[in-house]
Amino acid sequence: MGRPPKHDADRLLDAAAELLAAGGPAAVTMSAVAKAVGAPSGSVYHRFPDRPALLAALWSRTLRHFHDELLAVLTIENPGEAIRRSARATLDWARRNPREAAVLLAGARELGERDWSRQAHKDTALLNAAIQDAMTELIARTGDTGAAATDRVLLAVVDLPYALVRRYLRAGQRIPPHAADLAEQAAAALLGAAD
């Protein structure tokens, strides 16, 4: 049985996330990732044929990790609880994973999505479809058929938590524990406004 690779894909992607968090997407180059893990450049090219493949893998892995956590709360049966806990989950996840949150904050466009492979685009579309389906089902579970229902849920679950994450990370600050409380309270207030 052979030894596990010294520079596996996850270790390289961890380094890429660290580089992005510190210097933005432009800082994530094949040579910078290799240097960050103390590997020859060939180790990076062995796992990822080029920079677009590296960036696509970084995006996909980060999105999958975040979506796994968010899906667990979006699908809670009680819609009010699902909305409140989803707002909180985004802040809790970003607080525990600031490098990965910086990747999501950068966005697929800044990570050169136009140069990604067809398979990378398919992978991203599947991940996004799962979240969109869960959001659609959550909105339906609220029983609110009014025109503002979708906007209210998206504001509570997506827009406000994202704005808090962006404010702290763009300022180079750690997300404080109370940010998740604020996101949950804002979600609850939006739900109360619908009554």
Image (cartoon, rainbow, N blue to C red):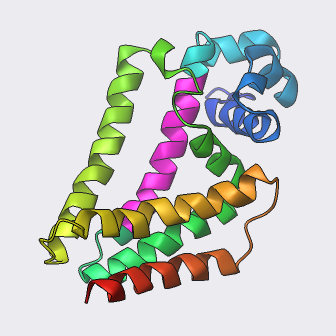
In this view, the residue in front, 82 or 151, is: 151
- Residue 79, position in %: x, y? 26, 79
Question: Is residue 18 rendered to the left or right of residue 35?
Answer: left
Magenta residues? 55-72
The answer to which image quadrant residue 153 occupies is bottom left
Picture residue at 42% right of the left edge, 14% below the top: 117
Q: Position of residue 65 (x, y in %)?
A: 50, 51
Of the pair 195 and 4, the residue shown nearer to us: 195
For image coordinates 73% across by 60% down, the residue present is 168
The count of marks equals 0
- Indicate whether 106 appears above or below 50: below
Q: Residue at x 51, y 31 (%)?
A: 108
* Between 174 and 147, the one nearer to me in the picture: 147
Please give left or right for residue 74 compared with residue 176 in the image.
left
Q: Is residue 4 visible?
A: no
Indicate whether residue 17 is drawn in magenta.
no
Instruction: Identify the residue at horizontal 53%, vertical 29% (top origin).
Output: 57
Tell me: 1 left or right of 61.
right
Q: Relative to 45, is 194 above or below?
A: below
Question: Which of 47/131 is in front?
Answer: 131
Any part of residue 192 in sight: yes
Q: Quadrant of the C terminus?
A: bottom left
